[in-house]
Amino acid sequence: MLEFRRVLFRSKPILRAVVFDFSGVSNIDTTSVQNLVDLRRVLERYAGDEVEFHFATILSPWIKRSVISLLCLPRKN
C-alpha cells in the first residue's frame, strides 16, 4: 500500500496555473472570495509549489477589486 502511494505521488501532473473565465460572473461576495483563497491554498499544497491564478473577462470593476484583494493576500504555508 505504501509503495502504491509513492508511485501515485510521483505520477501527479505538474500544476503551475489555473485560469478562471469570469465572463458569466455578475456578482461576487466574501464567501466566494474566501473559497478562492482556500482553493489556492489546497492547490499549492497539492502542487508543492506556488500556483498562479489567472482571471479572464472580468466584467465588473467591483469583481476585479475583490479578485485583486485575493491575489494580494500573503501566502500561508
Image (cartoon, rainbow, N blue to C red):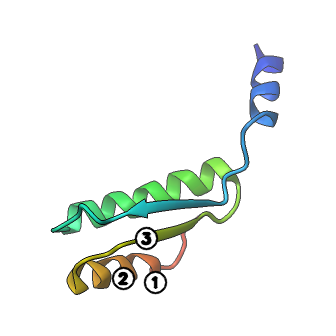
On screen, 8 above or below 41? above
**Label 2 amino acid?**
Ser
Side of 13 where 63 appears, left or right: left
Residue 29 image offset from top left, x and y in percent: 18, 68
The foreground one among 44 and 19 is: 19
Residue 36 image offset from top left, x and y in percent: 38, 61
Residue 11 image offset from top left, x and y in percent: 78, 33
- Give the residue at x 51% y 58%: 41
Mark 1, residues whose alpha carbon is within 10 Å: few (<14), some, or many (≥20)? Answer: few
Point out the frontmost of discs 2 and 3. Answer: 3
In contact (CB < 8 Å): disc 1 and disc 3 = no
Instruction: Give the number of the disc on residue 69.
Output: 2
Instruction: Give the number of the disc on residue 72.
Output: 1
- Give the residue at x 56% y 52%: 43
Residue under numbered circle 3: 55
CA gap, disc 1 and disc 2 = 5 Å
In contact (CB < 8 Å): disc 1 and disc 2 = yes
**Label 1 amino acid?**
Cys
**Label 3 amino acid?**
Phe
Q: Quadrant of the C terminus?
A: bottom right
Tell me the SS state at disc 2: helix
Side of 14 where 56 appears, left or right: left
- Give the residue at x 83% y 19%: 3
Tell me the SS state at disc 3: strand
